[in-house]
Image: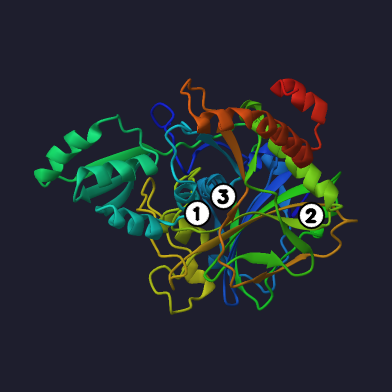
Amino acid sequence: MLGLALWSPPARSFCGFYVASGDAKLFNRASRVVLVRDQDSTVLTMANDFRGEPKQFAIVIPVPTVLAKDLIHVADPGLLDHIDAYSAPRLVEYFDENPCAPVLAGRMLSLMASAPERSEREAAGLGVRIEARYTVGEYDILILSADQSTGLETWLRQSGYNIPAGASRVLGSYIKQGLKFFVAKVNLKEQQKLGFSYLRPIQIAYESPRFMLPIRLGMVNADGPQELFIYALTRKGRVEATNYRTVKLPSDAEVPLFVKDEFADFYRALFDEQVRKESMQSVFTEYAWDMSWCDPCASPPLSSDELRGLGVSWLEDPGRGTAPGSRFLKISPGRRSMPIRIAPGGAGGVFITRLHVRYDGPHFPEDLVFQETADRASFQGRYILRHEWKGADQCRAADAYRSGLAERRAAQARTLATLTGWDLEEIRRRMAVK
């Protein structure tokens, strides 16, 4: 940017499950920047897409003050990989239920939008208590207790666990013995290796009332538009540009099933089309979320150690500001603490905003200037595959379901064409839509 020179057989999950990610590595000439902002303090971590000889690499970084040596560091590139995977636009899958055995749609929508706190309240309404949450290796683990088996079975099914029919009797026998329930899901993390070569990120800290990111210098020798991914970490809420239009990517759209095998091409085409519609003069929001949780999770939230490694200084003492130099805390090799579990809006929370910019000199003549807002509404670039129910059951609801599938497929084709600019007739041909 600134340089010169499934979990088990498919469960019928209400919240869906993550299957693919539109990460930064899908784009050429892409730079990644983490901005940690707290009052007038900024910690800036930068990783550039540089594919030449290391001796040919040079970087020029405009900064607001003379930086002392202890305010300049080399960062772990794994931190940027993790925050990118956590916040990337993603593809999720749902499986239609048997319409002859309906589930309340209101419950489905409620769970799709729920936070862990709401999940715990609804669990309590069924006599289920979430005693503990852990992330251990590749597993997300819950320790549950329950008052009665039917409530536990209901909660497990609603949460996407593939519970066999008639489980209530067996669960009930364990509940009577006062036993707890260890429940685990695999946390899938796909890493797409597309040949990019990143030098280790450079990290600097400084004090300045201006919340900005210099991009003009990096365009001096540029041979075309460049991609920039910004991961802003703040206490209060969403970050937006003040001198350019900030828009959210289209999201929560159903797309045809064949997109699953072509998600990289789909997401590049989608972003190309949105840039075209905005005349390459806008900053795009791809993700905005409280970092203590995610739904669905493409990657676990960053641990406290990882957040400190990026410069987040307020985790231990939310009310006390810190000097920039104190933000650089050493992380023991291989050590990972538990992801923080801070209630959304809490004083010690960390809010992430992921911004994506395609820029060049004529369209972005000014450096990017930002502001932190009080908006803590959750947003993610999220695209949905909905698998049709293929059962043979006969009932009035099933007849209505089957009769509506043709229009649903046609709508998915039109949505995909609108999002990407792809030819509608070709999409319809691939879907076998008449």
Q: Name the residue under label 2.
A: 218
Left or right: 167 with respect to 390? left
Q: Is residue 381 positioned above or below 262 on the image?
A: below
Residue sitting at the far right: 362
- Dot label at residue 87: 3
Q: How crowded is mark 1: few (under 14 residues within 10 Å), some or many (20 or more)?
A: few
Mark 2 or mark 3, which has the lower sequence index?
3
Amino acid identity at mark 1: Ala
Q: Residue at x 56, y 28 (%)?
A: 399
Mark 1 or mark 3, which has the lower sequence index?
3
Left or right: 162 with respect to 221? left
Mark 1 or mark 2, which has the lower sequence index?
1
Mark yes or no: residue 387 visible.
Answer: no
Residue sitting at the far front: 396
Front-most of residues 325 and 309 = 309
> Of tags 1 and 3, which is closer to the observer?
1
Helix, strand or loop under label 1: loop
- Dot label at residue 113: 1
Give how far apart the Cα atoms at labels 1 and 3 are: 17 Å
Q: Which residue is drawn at 87% across and 52% down?
A: 279
